[in-house]
Amino acid sequence: DAGITQSPRHKVTETGTPVTLRCHQTENHRYMYWYRQDPGHGLRLIHYSYGVKDTDKGEVSDGYSVSRSKTEDFLLTLESATSSQTSVYFCAGAINQGNEQYFGPGTRLTVT
Amino acid sequence: AQSVTQPDIHITVSEGASLELRCNYSYGATPYLFWYVQSPGQGLQLLLKYFSGDTLVQGIKGFEAEFKRSQSSFNLRKPSVHWSDAAEYFCAVGAGFGNEKLTFGTGTRLTIIP
């Protein structure tokens, strides 16, 4: 969906360093989500937001934090990256709760 | 809590053949159901959705899916596949309005042979 962009698209970082991934949307999605995708696991929800400054944990939130200071931007931070956080990260947005989600192109993160 | 099972990890079909991808869900009430497709290196694209009403829903790219409450299933079908349909397909279930989260299946990878 052209309305959701992610940056960077690829990142390699070292264990123990902080990393921030950015999701930007222009579709006025109220709800935004961060997922990680790993082989054999499908998509797993890390954190989500239901409005500016309103966030909640998903099923795999340990080691991650998020912030949403304005509607358009949803940041995912790995405070101290570990090799287990090597993954592809997807951001998604939804206009209303329960509605279909629209996905960004993903960020491939490698932690060495 | 809802859950989704996609029993087929990988399916191979010939170009022009029909396709059915299976999805079973677990949820106590009428769920919201979705199928997404992911091409290599891309994000997920919505193929179709079911919220209520007609249990046979039409989507993009010639796909359709049928909601069967008695079988807790929402299988995806296409009468004749094209080489460009090779991708990974994800079924997802939501608990409906009032629940913000979707639960995704682990995906089915579709390979098309000439």
Image (tube, helix red, strand yellow):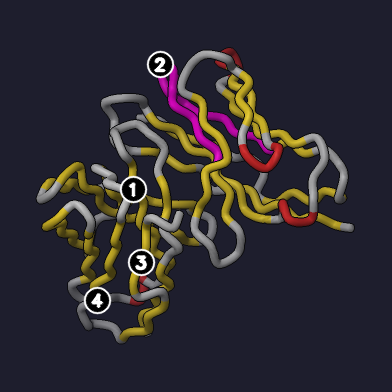
- The amino acid type found where label 3 is placed reads Gln
* SS state under label 1: strand
Mark 4 touches mark 2? (CB < 8 Å) = no
Q: Position of residue B58 (x, y in %)?
A: 63, 29
Mark 3 touches mark 4? (CB < 8 Å) = no
Q: Which mark is residue B29?
A: 2
Q: Nearer the viewer, residue B74 or B37?
A: B37
Quadrant of the rendered image containing residue B93: top left
Q: Position of residue B109 (x, y in %)?
A: 66, 53
Labels 2, 1: front one: 1
Quadrant of the rendered image containing residue A62: bottom left
- Compute the Cα span from label 2 to label 1: 24 Å
Q: Which mark is residue A6?
A: 3
- The amino acid type found where label 2 is placed reads Ala
Labels 4, 1: front one: 1
* SS state under label 3: strand
Q: Which mark is residue B76?
A: none
Q: Nearer the viewer, residue A88 or B6?
A: A88
Q: Nearer the viewer, residue B77 or B28?
A: B77
Badge 4 density bin: few <14, some 14–19, many ≥20, Cα 10 Å: some
The residue identified by callout 1 is: A93
Badge 2 density bin: few <14, some 14–19, many ≥20, Cα 10 Å: few
Q: Which mark is residue A19?
A: 4
Q: Which residues are magenta?
A: B21-35
Q: Position of residue A33 (x, y in %)?
A: 30, 50
- The amino acid type found where label 4 is placed reads Val
Q: Does residue B91 appear left or right of residue B27 in this picture?
A: right
Quadrant of the rendered image containing residue B60: top right
Sequence-earlier tag: 3 or 4: 3
Mark 1 touches mark 3? (CB < 8 Å) = no
Q: Provide the chain ID for the residue under circle 4.
A: A
From the image, which quarter does the C terminus of chain B lie in?
bottom right
